[in-house]
Image (cartoon, rainbow, N blue to C red):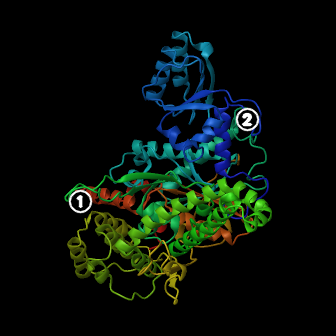
C-alpha cells in the first residue's frame, strides 16, 4: 500500500496473489515452505484470466506451484489424460461451450473449474449436463466462483479489464447515442468488477460519489449488490476473512467514485515522472514494456536492407528495486540514478576480477601468496554475492535501455518544453512564449503533442478564445498536420459546462537555476541530457486528489459537499449527502469511472506520503495513455460532426443536465 504499512495488513496485490495460489493449489490454502512435491497440473485460462495472472505470477512461480503447461482455452490442445486441469475463465457462453467440449473429449484426468466472476445457475446446469453426457461427473472435482474480475498492477493500483476495454471506455459511457440498455450493460460490467474487488479486499466500503454522473449510477448499483449479499447471511462473502487479519480491520474504507469528466486535462498532459513517461511514450501495459531495438545495417554491399528491428520485452515488477524506488521520480533523477548504479556495479565487478586474478592467476610470487590469505574471505564474500551482482547488472541494463528509449522521445519531441508549458497553463502561471508559437514550431513535437497542448489550454481557460483566435489556432493546428476531431468533441463538452465558473487548479513546476544535473552531463554518462531541462516537480493536488482529500479528511468544500453517501451495511438505504460518521478515514479507494492514468496515480502516491498511517488505492475502469484517450476523443468528435449533436454528456447525466453542469464546475 501507499504510505506506511501497518504490520498486519495485506495489499490488494498480496491478496489477489494469495487467492490465485490457493486456486492453483486446488482451492486449498498454499503453504509456502511445504516440503512435499507439488501436484503437476495444467492451467487453462482465457485472455481475461491470462491478464489477471500475468502481472502477479511469473512462469517460475507457476512452475513452483506445479503448473507444467499454461494454455489458452480456445487454442488447439492435445489430450493429457493423466494430469488434472485447473481452469480460470470468465463464465461466458463461448467459454462454457468449449469447457463442455473438453469434457466430451476426455482431455484431462480431472477438472477444477474456476470462474473469474460468478457463474449463473443456467450455465452451471449446462456444464452438469455436459459432464453427465460425457460420463465425466466424477472427474469434475470442484467448481468455484473466484471473484477475481480485476487486474492488480501495483500494491495500490488496479484496473478493471484489459480485454474488451472498449466496452467500459470513456467513449462507451459518453456516447451521445447510447441506449438505456447499453448503459445498463456498461454499468453492470463495472459494478461486477468492483464487487469482486471488495470481496477480495474483504471489506464493505462507505461509498461517496458525485451526483448526476456515471459514477452515481455505479454507486447506486454497487450499493444494491453489496446490500443484497450482506442480507443473505448464510452465503455472504463478507463474513470471514480468509487471509487472516483484514487490511481494514479497525475501520471501514471509503470508496470515492469520480467521473472522468471532472478533469479531462490530466489524461492529455505530458508528464515528467518515470512510470508515467514510460506509459506515455512507450508500449507499456500490464507492467510489461515492449521496445524496438534497431539492429543497424549488415556489413554487406551498399544499398543493403537494414536489419529488422528486434523486439524486446521487459517486466517492470515489484522485485525490481530500482523501479520501485524511482518509478515516481522526475526523469533527470532517474537518468542520474541509472548512471550511479552503473558506476557502483563497475566498481564491484572490478573488485571481483581483481580478487580472482590474485587467486593463482598472478603466478606464485611471495606477494601473491601473502595477499591470498588476506583476500580469501573477501573472495568468498564476492563469489557468494555474484548472483546478486548479476541480477543488479540485468536491472541496470534493463533501465538503461528503457530510460534511453524514453530520452529519445523527450529530445526528439521536446517533451520537457511541453510538460513545462502545460504546467504553466494548468496552474494559471504567466507564459513565456505564445501558444501559437509552440504549435507552429516545426521542431517541437508531433501533431498529437500539439493537439494535446491546445486541448489542455482550451479546457483550462476560464474564457474560451474568441472565434477569430480559435480560427487562427485551428489553422496552425491543421498546418501542423493535426486532426481537429478531438477539438470538436471538447468544444461540445466545454459548452455544456460553460455555466460553471470555478477553474480547476493543477500542479505547478519550477526549474532549477543550476540547469542540468551534473552527473548525467559527464562525458562518461550513458545519457546525453544536453538540451533537456532539469524540471523539478512541486507537489500540487490534481482534481481527483483534491476530491479525495475533502472526503477522506471530512472537509467541508462546495466541490464535494453535495456528494451522495451510501452505507451498504445500513438496514435502509437513504438518499443522503450527510455522512453519519464524522471521523476522518484512514483508508480510501479512489475509482475513476471513464478511465484513469499514471499521472493521477502518482499524484495520489505523493499526496499520501505526508499522511502518516493512511492508505490509498487507485482504480479505474480502463488505464489509458494520452494517445489512446485522444483516439477516443477523435472518434467522439467524428460522431459529433456526423450530426449526433445530442449533448455530449446527456447519456452520463441520465437526463440530469442541470446537475451535471455542477459536477463539471471545475473549469
The percent coordinates of residue 142 (x first, y second) are 64, 24
In percent of the image, x 25 and y 65: which residue is there? 483
The percent coordinates of residue 493 (x first, y second) are 36, 65
Q: Is residue 553 left or right of residue 601?
A: right
Residue 641's disc is 1
Answer whether residue 463 is visible to the viewer in this image.
Answer: yes
- Dot 2: within a 10 Å radius of its alpha carbon, few (fewer than 14), some, or many (20 or more) residues? some
- Quadrant location of the N terminus? bottom right
- Dot 1: within a 10 Å radius of its alpha carbon, few (fewer than 14), some, or many (20 or more) residues? few
Q: Is residue 660 above or below residue 231?
A: below
Q: Is residue 271 above or below residue 11?
A: below
* Label 2 or label 1, whichever comes before in sequence order: 2
Q: Quadrant of residue 580?
A: bottom right
Work out whether residue 331 or residue 342 is closer to the camera in this orientation and state it: 342
- Foreground mark, 2 or 1, reads 2
Q: Are marks 2 and 1 in contact (CB under 8 Å)?
A: no
Distance of label 2 from label 1 (alpha carbons): 56 Å
Answer whether residue 1 is visible to the viewer in this image.
Answer: no
Q: Which residue is mark 2?
A: 29
In percent of the image, x 50 and y 64: which residue is there? 400
Q: Quick one: SS at disc 1? A: helix
Q: Is residue 292 above or below residue 127?
A: below
Residue at the extreme front: 365
The percent coordinates of residue 610 (x first, y second) are 69, 72
Q: Is residue 236 left or right of residue 508?
A: right
Q: Is residue 500 above or below residue 437?
A: above
Q: Quick one: SS at disc 2? A: loop
Amino acid at each position: 500500500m501507499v504510505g506506511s504499512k501497518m504490520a498486519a495488513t495485506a495489499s490488494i496485490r498480496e491478496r489477489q496473489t494469495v487467492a490465485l495460489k490457493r486456486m492453483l493449489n486446488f482451492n486449498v490454502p498454499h503453504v509456502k515452505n511445504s516440503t512435499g512435491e507439488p501436484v503437476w497440473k495444467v492451467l487453462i485460462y482465457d485472455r481475461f484470466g491470462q491478464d489477471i495472472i500475468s502481472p502477479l505470477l511469473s512462469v517460475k512461480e507457476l512452475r513452483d506451484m506445479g503448473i507444467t503447461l499454461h494454455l489458452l482455452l480456445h487454442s488447439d490442445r492435445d489430450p493429457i489424460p493423466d494430469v488434472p486441469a485447473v481452469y480460470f475463465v470468465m463464465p461466458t457462453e463461448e467459454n462454457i461451450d468449449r469447457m463442455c467440449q473438453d469434457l466430451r473429449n476426455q482431455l484431462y484426468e480431472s477438472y477444477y473449474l474456476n470462474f473469474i466472476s460468478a457463474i449463473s445457475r443456467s450455465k452451471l446446469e449446462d456444464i452438469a449436463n455436459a459432464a453427465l453426457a460425457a460420463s465425466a461427473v466424477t472427474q469434475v472435482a470442484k467448481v468455484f466462483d473466484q471473484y477475481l474480475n480485476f487486474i492488480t498492477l501495483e500494491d495500490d493500483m488496479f484496473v478493471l479489464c484489459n480485454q474488451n476495454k472498449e466496452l467500459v471506455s470513456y467513449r462507451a459511457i459518453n456516447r451521445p447515442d447510447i441506449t438505456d440498455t447499453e448503459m445498463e450493460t456498461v454499468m453492470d460490467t463495472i459494478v461486477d468488477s468492483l464487487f469482486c474487488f471488495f470481496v477480495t479486499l474483504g471489506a464493505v466500503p462507505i461509498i461517496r460519489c458525485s451526483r448526476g454522473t456515471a459514477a452515481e449510477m455505479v454507486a447506486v448499483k454497487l450499493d444494491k449488490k453489496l446490500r443484497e449479499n450482506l442480507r443473505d447471511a448464510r452465503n455472504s462473502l463478507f463474513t470471514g476473512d480468509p487471509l487472516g487479519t483484514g487490511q481494514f480491520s479497525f475501520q471501514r474504507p471509503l470508496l470515492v467514485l469520480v467521473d472522468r469528466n471532472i478533469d479531462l486535462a490530466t489524461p492529455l498532459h505530458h508528464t515528467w515522472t518515470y512510470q508515467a513517461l514510460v506509459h506515455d511514450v512507450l508500449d507499456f501495459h500490464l507492467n510489461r514494456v515492449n521496445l524496438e531495438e534497431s539492429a543497424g545495417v549488415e556489413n554487406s554491399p551498399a544499398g543493403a536492407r537494414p536489419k529488422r528491428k528486434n523486439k524486446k520485452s521487459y517486466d517492470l515488477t515489484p522485485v525490481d528495486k530500482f523501479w520501485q524506488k524511482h518509478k515516481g521520480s522526475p526523469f533527470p533523477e532517474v537518468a542520474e540514478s541509472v548512471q550511479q548504479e552503473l558506476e557502483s556495479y563497475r566498481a564491484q565487478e572490478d573488485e571481483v576480477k581483481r580478487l580472482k586474478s590474485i587467486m593463482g592467476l598472478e603466478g606464485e610470487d611471495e606477494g601473491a601468496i601473502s595477499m591470498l590469505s588476506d583476500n580469501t574471505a573477501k573472495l568468498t564474500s564476492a563469489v557468494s554475492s555474484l548472483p546478486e551482482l548479476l541480477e543488479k547488472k540485468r536491472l541496470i541494463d534493463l533501465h538503461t535501455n528503457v530510460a534511453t528509449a524514453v530520452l529519445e522521445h523527450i529530445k526528439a519531441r521536446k517533451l520537457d518544453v511541453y510538460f513545462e508549458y502545460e504546467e504553466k497553463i494548468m496552474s494559471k502561471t504567466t507564459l513565456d512564449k505564445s501558444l501559437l508559437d509552440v504549435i507552429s514550431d516545426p521542431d517541437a513535437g508531433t501533431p498529437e503533442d500539439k493537439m494535446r497542448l491546445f486541448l489542455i489550454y482550451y479546457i483550462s481557460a476560464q474564457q474560451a478564445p474568441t472565434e477569430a483566435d480559435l480560427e487562427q489556432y485551428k489553422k496552425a493546428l491543421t498546418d501542423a498536420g493535426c486532426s481537429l476531431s478531438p477539438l470538436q468533441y471538447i468544444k461540445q463538452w466545454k459548452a455544456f459546462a460553460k455555466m460553471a465558473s470555478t477553474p480547476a487548479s493543477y500542479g505547478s513546476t519550477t526549474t532549477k537555476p543550476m540547469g542540468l544535473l551534473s552527473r548525467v552531463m559527464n562525458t562518461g554518462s550513458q545519457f546525453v541530457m544536453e538540451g533537456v531541462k532539469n524540471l523539478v516537480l512541486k507537489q500540487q493536488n490534481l482534481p481527483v486528489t483534491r476530491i479525495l482529500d475533502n472526503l477522506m479528511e471530512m472537509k467541508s468544500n462546495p466541490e464535494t459537499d453535495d456528494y451522495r453517501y451510501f452505507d451498504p451495511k445500513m438496514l435502509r438505504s437513504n438518499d443522503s449527502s450527510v455522512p453519519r460518521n464524522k471521523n476522518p478515514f484512514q483508508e480510501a479507494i479512489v475509482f475513476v469511472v471513464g478511465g484513469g492514468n499514471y499521472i493521477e496515480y502518482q499524484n495520489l502516491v505523493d499526496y499520501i506520503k505526508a499522511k502518516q498511517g493512511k492508505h490509498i488505492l487507485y482504480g479505474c475502469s480502463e488505464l489509458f495513455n494520452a494517445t489512446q484517450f485522444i483516439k477516443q476523443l477523435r472518434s467522439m468528435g467524428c460522431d459529433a460532426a456526423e450530426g449526433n449533436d445530442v449533448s455530449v454528456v446527456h447519456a452520463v447525466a441520465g437526463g440530469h443536465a442541470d446537475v451535471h453542469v455542477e459536477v463539471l464546475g471545475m473549469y
